[in-house]
Image: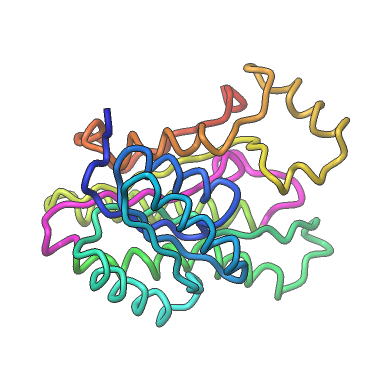
Amino acid sequence: MKLLEGKTAIITGGSRGIGRGIVEVFANHGANVAFTYSSSSEAAEALATEVSKKGVKAKAYQSDAASFSDSEALAIKVLEDFGSIDILVNNAGITKDNLLMRMSEADFDKVIEVNLKSVFNMTKAVQRTMLKQRKGSIINMGSVVGVKGNAGQTNYAASKAGIIGFSKSVALELGSRDIRCNVIAPGFIETEMTGKLDAATVQGWRDAIPLKRGGSPDDIANACVFFASDLSAYVTGQVLNVDGGMLT
């Protein structure tokens, strides 16, 4: 059963990791996908070609979600190319980890700009279209770190906690127009980035998780399908921890 048949989704940071998983799973469910990338154009174009074979429309756009003007231009272009914007997944994000005493102002500002301001930029950019349609689903990628904090990640935790407050406010503002806004808070998700970490460290993290494994991009993507589809038609302003029981 294809839960997103005929819907158009914008996914920021969609060329690798969790974003790539969302692009692929959404396409499997019949969604047309517009996704952004920052620098790896070859990988992005290859993904768009691969996903198009599933019988959906797929297009990659080079766009900086941290830029207000880029976000506005992207929303206009996607509307021209696809005809509607039904789903927005704000997935673009970075880390610049350090203890507070060693963290530079630039590293704090950059993480807030890319992780949090991008959510404002893109939500504002698609809002007009969704209001006209009187329907839409906005899914913001938080983190368990935004719920419980983490030493060495004050900038990242602040950005992800900010996303929760922003999303709950958007849910209150736009609910009367049938526009929903929810947050997914991933735990330890294994991607090509975690593949570069020391094996013993990774195994230690797995052992501390009740389900005894790291999550996969598909685990996050499947939760996104729930929020993007009509299965969650009466769910808004919520934070769903997808973490194998980490925060239980």
Q: In this view of the protein, which residue sits in the foreground, 12 or 175?
A: 12
Residue at position x 35%, y 38% from top? 238
Q: In this view of the protein, which residue sits in the foreground, 245 or 168?
A: 245
Q: In the rendered view, would you say 66 is above or below 153?
A: below
Question: Which quadrant of the figure has residue 194?
Answer: top right
Question: Which quadrant of the figure has residue 190?
Answer: top right
Q: How many marks?
A: 0
Image quadrant containing the N terminus: top left
Q: In this view of the protein, which residue sits in the foreground, 54 or 170?
A: 54
Relative placement, left or right, of 185 versus 74 is: right
Residue at position x 51%, y 35% from top? 218
Region of the chain picked out in magenta, as a range: 130-154
Indicate whether residue 150 is drawn in magenta: yes
Residue 53 appears at what percent x and percent y?
Answer: 40, 48
Residue 12 appears at what percent x and percent y?
Answer: 46, 60
Image quadrant containing the C terminus: top right
Residue farthest front in this picture: 53
Residue at position x 31%, y 75% from top? 77
Residue 146 appears at what percent x and percent y?
Answer: 56, 46
Residue at position x 79%, y 33% from top? 202
Residue farthest bottom in this picture: 69
Indicate whether residue 67 is drawn in magenta: no
Q: In this view of the protein, which residue sits in the foreground, 152 or 62?
A: 62
Relative placement, left or right, of 58 versus 17 is: left
Residue 20 appears at what percent x and percent y?
Answer: 52, 49
Q: How is the image coloured?
A: rainbow
Relative placement, left or right, of 4 versus 199 is: left
